[in-house]
Amino acid sequence: MYKIGKAEELATNIYLMVVEAPRVAKSCQPGQFVIVRTDEDGERIPLTICDYDREKGTVTIVVQVVGAATKMMSRLQAGDSFHDFAGPLGRPSDFVSEDMESLKKKRILFVAGGLGTAPVYPQVKWLHERGIAADVIIGAKTKELLIMEEEMKAVAGNLYVTTDDGSYGRSGMVTKVIDDLITEEGKSYDVCVAIGPMIMMKFVCLTTKKYDLPTVVSMNPIMVDGTGMCGACRLTVDGEVKFACVDGPEFDGHKVDFDQAMKRQQIYKTREGRDFLKAQEGDTHHGGCGNCGGND
């Protein structure tokens, strides 16, 4: 059992939990995820790691209520426990293995949309701890849906907050802020990391492509099983079949077929749709098929 040391509501239907999981905390890196089950019969939910403390042996996750399993999670309080907390899974962010001197010379922009602020935070914090100041854009529909602003402010080089309705910070989508920073404020970047809803990442990539700005995205939103066996997170990257949970979750955003991924996400929601995809995709439907890198 994995005891919850802290549980709090960050915004409507969004909850932060600090979980005692020493083995996960010992080896996890920014960009990775865990699979969590509330009880023995509970659904397996993949969640990106939001933060970790190796000394205390804790891992922080952020849960958004979208169904019965996450609703059950949201009811847990400090002192309660998760039945399973498996990880770390997925590949760490690329910059974790980069040459540090080269990395320090890079101008990095992070773009976080909604719940995407949670997985962006450990990456920005990791860089901050190594003396690298990254610019960060946080976007949400309204002020009430913004999360972790103060935490991000403490580790970002510059923090730009925007809301779709203009109720707080700048007004407009995150893509408008990217345009403004580059065209109006004279900023330039070597790489962009965008994490958030699929549609947001698609349009961030369309925006950064105008500036020839390499962009990394996290395909965590389409993961279901987290092991490559369910076929939910199958996507096409540069013409090749990949699976977010075993080959990612991070990919070159300019090479991801977002339209196909979003269409599959809708089809996959029904049993009939899942059967259709399995029949259509054959041996490449599952990540453990050996044809897609899922066994690496």
Image (cartoon, helix red, strand yellow):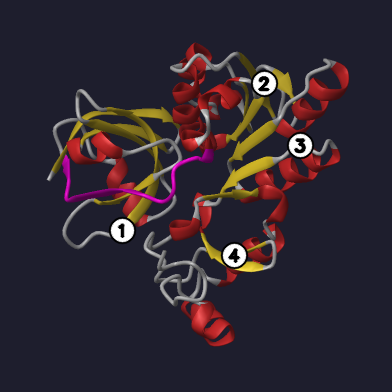
**Closer to the eye: label 2 or 3:** 3
Residue type pointed to by label 2: Ser
Q: Secondary structure at mark 3?
A: loop
The disc placed on residue 213 is 3
Q: Quadrant of residue 215?
A: top right
The stretch of residues the image draws in magenta is 81-94
In-image side of 270 versus 135 (left or right): left
Residue type pointed to by label 3: Leu
Q: Secondary structure at mark 1?
A: loop
- Residue 220 seen anywhere in this rendered image of the structure: yes
Q: Secondary structure at mark 4?
A: strand
Q: Nearer the viewer, residue 106 or 280?
A: 106
Circle 4: is it few (<14), some (14-19), or many (20+) Cα within 10 Å? many
Residue type pointed to by label 4: Leu
CA gap between label 3 and label 1 equals 36 Å
Mark found first going from the N terminus, 4 or 2: 2
Residue 89 lies in the magenta stretch: yes
Mark found first going from the N terminus, 4 or 3: 3
Residue type pointed to by label 1: Arg
CA gap between label 1 and label 2 equals 36 Å
| Residue carrying label 2 | 167
| Residue carrying label 1 | 44
**Closer to the eye: label 4 or 3:** 3
**Closer to the eye: label 1 or 4:** 4
Name the spot of residue 145 as percent of width and height, x first: 54, 30
Q: Is residue 220 above or below residue 154?
A: below
Q: Nearer the viewer, residue 225 or 101?
A: 101
CA gap between label 4 and label 2 equals 36 Å
| Residue carrying label 4 | 235
